[in-house]
Amino acid sequence: MYKKPVIVFEGIEGSGKTLHSRFLSNYFKKKKIKFIKFREPGGCSSSEKIRKLILDNKSNFHKITDLFLYFASRNENLEKIIKNNYGKKLILIDRFFDSTIAYQHYGMGIDLKLINSLSSYFIKKINVDLTFLNLVNMTNLRMRLAKRKKLNRYDKFKLSFYRNVQNGYIKLYKKNKRRYRVIDSNLSISINKQKIIREVEKLLR
């Protein structure tokens, strides 16, 4: 299909998305597949500065301010990473525009039209080819967060918030099943690794 696709890992805290994206990046290295990987919020150096601001436990931004900070971070990545590599290298992203809808709309209640309007302006012709949606039950979520040595601002919401966000992700998946692949992060890591490799190999074929 696509020789140099854009692959995204999405999911709430504790869903294993970062673990799985790291695994896939190691797989690409072993296969000598050229790729570039970054996370959101974060990515290029300027985006990482914005990430620290967003996730700082002392930050207390209004939800609209939060939204614009996320888009500011994303714009830096678009200008300094994505546009320079799109179609030239495989791009692997730990969260992208779906997370903004899931968190800022379904989680925080920001108007979806505003989010979609901003996404259309910034992202334009950048297409995601494959999205792995990592799902986790609330029991495992609570246990995994409890094991973290350091919690950031987005690790400290009520379980109802994460439930709303995850349900938002599921709604996005149901609207676009062709692009999504669901990863049940309550299952063993080895099972999920095998599924991810199968799906990626199909895409690269």
Image (spheres, rainbow, N blue to C red):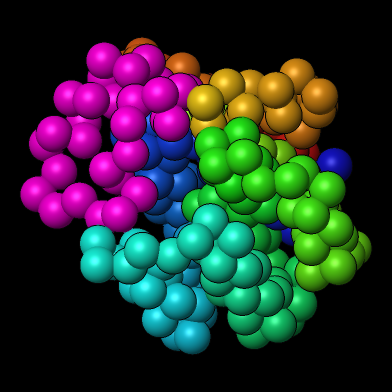
Q: Position of residue 77 (x, y in %)?
A: 62, 75
Label the magenta part by its dominant secondary structure. Answer: helix
Quadrant occupied by the N terminus = top right
The residue under the point 61% across, 34% down is: 106
The residue under the point 79% across, 54% down is: 114
Is residue 193 shown to the viewer in this render? Answer: no
Q: Tell me if 30 is positioned left or right of 2 in this view.
A: left
Relative vertical location of residue 128 with respect to residue 121 in this rendering, above or below: above
The residue under the point 37% across, 74% down is: 53
Task: Out of 102 and 110, give the one closest to the viewer.
Answer: 110
Task: Out of 78 and 54, give the one closest to the viewer.
Answer: 54
Is residue 89 shown to the viewer in this render? Answer: yes
Q: Is residue 156 magenta?
A: yes
Relative vertical location of residue 175 with respect to residue 76 in this rendering, above or below: above
Q: Position of residue 62 (x, y in %)?
A: 49, 61
Q: Which residues are magenta?
A: 135-163
Q: Tell me if 153 is positioned left or right of 93 in this view.
A: left
Q: Is residue 152 magenta?
A: yes
Quadrant occupied by the C terminus = top right
Q: Tell me if 181 is positioned left or right of 1 in this view.
A: left
Q: Position of residue 199 (x, y in %)?
A: 64, 29
